[in-house]
Image (cartoon, rainbow, N blue to C red):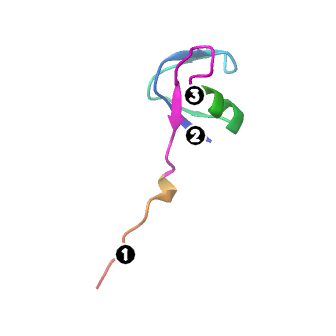
């Protein structure tokens, strides 16, 4: 699952700092941990990134 960092933090799994706006790939368990306040930082660190393929393409008329 793709996620976007909304608060800079040091990721112990990736062994590096993740900065605001950075896109990262997470599994469901890790996403659940980082997207709630039930983590070591006690705050939400990432949010889900919407997939561009889900956008509706308007039909051309004419």
Q: Which residue is mark 3?
A: 36
Q: CA distance from mark 1 to mark 3?
A: 38 Å
Between discs 1 and 3, the one toward the N terminus: 3
Q: Which residues are magenta?
A: 35-51
Q: CA distance from mark 2 to mark 1?
A: 28 Å
Residue 41, relative to residue 20: is it above or below? above
Residue 58 in percent (x, y) is at 36, 70
Residue 1 in percent (x, y) is at 62, 42
Residue 7 in percent (x, y) is at 47, 21
Between discs 2 and 3, the one toward the N terminus: 2
Q: CA distance from mark 2 to mark 3?
A: 16 Å
Q: At 49% from the left edge and 47% from the top edge, which residue is drawn? A: 50
Q: Which residue is mark 1?
A: 59
Q: The C terminus lies in which quarter of the figure?
A: bottom left
Q: At 30% from the left edge and 82% from the top edge, which residue is drawn? A: 61
50 lies left or right of 29: left
Between discs 2 and 1, the one toward the N terminus: 2
Q: Mark 2, mark 3: which one is toward the viewer?
A: 3
Q: At 57% from the left edge and 28% from the top edge, which residue is drawn? A: 36
Q: Check whether the beta carbons of the residues at disc 2 and disc 3 lie within 8 A of each other.
A: no
Q: Residue 33's image quarter?
A: top right
Q: At 70% from the left edge and 20% from the top edge, which residue is drawn? A: 13
SS at circle 3 = loop
How would you rate the neighbour count of disc 1 (Cα within 10 Å): few for under 14, some for 14-19, many for 20 or more?
few
Q: Which residue is mark 2?
A: 2
The residue lying furthest to the left in this view is 62
Residue 2 in percent (x, y) is at 58, 40
């Amino acid at each position: 699952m793709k996620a976007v960092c909304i608060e800079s933090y040091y990721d112990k799994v990736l062994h590096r700092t993740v900065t605001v706006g950075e896109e990262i790939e997470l599994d469901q368990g890790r996403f659940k941990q980082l997207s709630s306040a039930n983590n070591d930082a006690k705050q939400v660190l990432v949010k889900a990134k919407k997939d561009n393929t889900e956008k509706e393409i308007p039909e051309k008329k004419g």
